[in-house]
Image: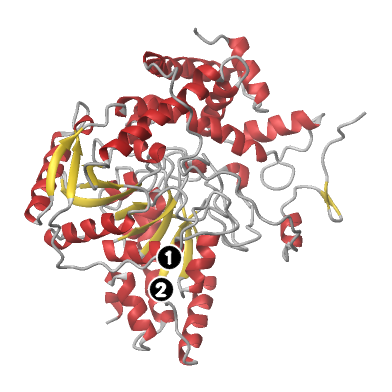
Amino acid sequence: MKDGWIDWAAGRIAEEVNAGRVKAEEVVRAFLSRIREVDPRLRAFVTVLEAEALEQARAVDARISAGKPGGRLAGVPVAIKDNMLVRGVETTCSSKILRGYKAPYDATVVTRLRLEGAVIIGKTNLDEFAMGSSTENSAFFKTKNPWDLERVPGGSSGGSAAAVAARMAPLALGSDTGGSIRQPAAFCGVVGVKPTYGLVSRYGLVAFASSLDQIGPFAANVADAALALSVIEGHDAADSTSAPVEGRRYALEDSLGLAGLRIGLPKEYFTQGLEREVEASTRAAVKVFESLGASVREVSLPHTRYAVSTYYILAPSEASANLARFDGMRYGYSRREASSLEQAYASSRGEGFGPEVKRRIMLGTYALSSGYYDAYYGKAQRVRTLIKRDFDEVFESVDLLLTPTAPTTAFRFGEKSADPLQMYLSDIFTIPCNIAGCAGLSMPSGLDSRGLPIGIQLLARPFEESRMLQAARAFEAARPFPALPA
Amino acid sequence: MPIDEKAVRHIARLARMELRAEELEAYRNQLDKILESMEELRALDTDRVSATSHVLGLTDVLRPDQARLFENREALLEGAPEREGPYYKVRKVIE
């Protein structure tokens, strides 16, 4: 049944394609037609790779016809956030400064997806250079939340989250520096994983804040997210910050109870600013985990309140250094008529970057400038130690942490864009995990009274993705999330 | 300490970003507010706390210093706004 394919799990598509019961090309055609149908309204994609995707699909089909394995993601369309390189394809970071830039090579994650038979179907919209929480900072257009077109999909990986929620792709990749996978996953009602810092290679990811950035998958269910993660994770010699661990296979069991699992509820995440319905849904999730055999108790991460300030010193500082490479000389937007080299840099950058990117470069440059370094960047790095220590200590007595992913459900366009500080606070529950480097995921726990998805977040010790995903799978099996939006 | 216009100009110069007058004023205001909210970090005693720059604790990741051929060289150069043969062309730096 042709229309069914867009509703299939990624794992099932790969199985059917490998078994020769379905052609990868037919699957890809179905998703391309879904994109043509709904993306004009949602605008999740910056680039759709129609011809290339069909060509890749035919190559997968040829491999299988020749009796070779199609791969663990055979014929599975994957959408890639437009800050990761796909060879020969425009990579814009949703910024005017990179418009027209064609990637000369594939990011390691893209190479690994291709090796397992995945089909790159397009590049998705983001807040410019991944700086934002609503995708409103894209220099091109706003992506809409599939559940309510008047609301944001979250950000910065809003295009990837919306693409999966609207079944334009069964899988997508995003990047998460302070919540940019988990918060849009929560707003769009899908699963989003922020792996342990260093688990997934960042070779070919346009760097934002190098001590925090991590690539991870979006999927409509936990098993698909685990499958995608197992394909992209593991050491890569091309990324010197990549952890020396091999890629793993996640064998998730549907029926497994969670007896013996200790879950902590950090009390600092249940304070003011948390919407009542989001809190209620998280508390209801606690009951589900308890009914599965887990023991749940309150814990404390005392330095949580300092995380946002710490983050908004560290991330802009690192960004101001990373974004120095965009100078209009080797690629991208360029003002050539300037009188001097320095003037050419300054006008290319002044005109090429959007307001939020410039704000963060200014903030970061200030925090790193002579006379202020110790007071800001140095101080933030020390506070980072305290925040990380909170996690180390609490993970001595519990295995996982359970929190709301964001204080609210999806907000309206323009609701927070006038006040940068308000926007920054929407990441209050996701930021600490990046600062500490641990693993995190967001998954849907229900809908609020407006019909908007609510997300819960699970956090785990570094490299304990397996435990986190198994708990998420058990929760999902006990409390299936009813539907994706029409 | 509030940031004045001179300081904002200095920061923009360090960042090699040309900003319009209204941008300078807007950023002055916003940086003021953002930095003020960060004052809360001062309340924490961190005198005896060491800095964390990398959470995994990886140090000195080394590999053999071997040149490798990048097979898609032309694609790298193609992106240049201005080039001459295999070179990027920039404004004159030395008079």
Mark yes or no: residue A189 visible.
Answer: yes
Residue drawn at 50 percent across, 8 percent down = B2
Judged left or right of residue A151, residue A291 is left
Check contact, mark 1 vs mark 2: CB within 8 A. yes
Same subunit, labels 1 and 2: the answer reads yes
Residue drawn at 45 percent across, 71 percent down = A118
Residue A330 place in picture, x, y as percent: 73, 47
Residue A133 place in picture, x, y as percent: 38, 39
Q: Residues within 10 Å of mark 1 (few under 14, many from 20)?
A: many
Residue A173, by quadrant, is bottom left
Residue type at tag 2: Leu
Judged left or right of residue A3, residue A477 is left
Local secondary structure at mark 1: strand
> Which labelled disc corresponds to residue A73?
2
Mark yes or no: residue A486 visible.
Answer: no
For marks 1 and 2, the one nearer the N-term is 2
Residue labelled with disc 1: A78
Residue A350 place in picture, x, y as percent: 63, 31
**Circle 1 marks a residue in which chain?**
A
In the foreground, A224 or A150: A224
> Against A55, is B57 above or below?
above
**Circle 2 marks a residue in which chain?**
A
Residue drawn at 36 percent across, 77 percent down = A14
In the foreground, A210 or A172: A210
Residue drawn at 24 percent across, 41 percent down = A409
Residue type at tag 1: Val
> Against A342, is A208 above or below?
below
Q: Residue furthest right?
A: B95
> Which labelled disc corresponds to residue B14?
none
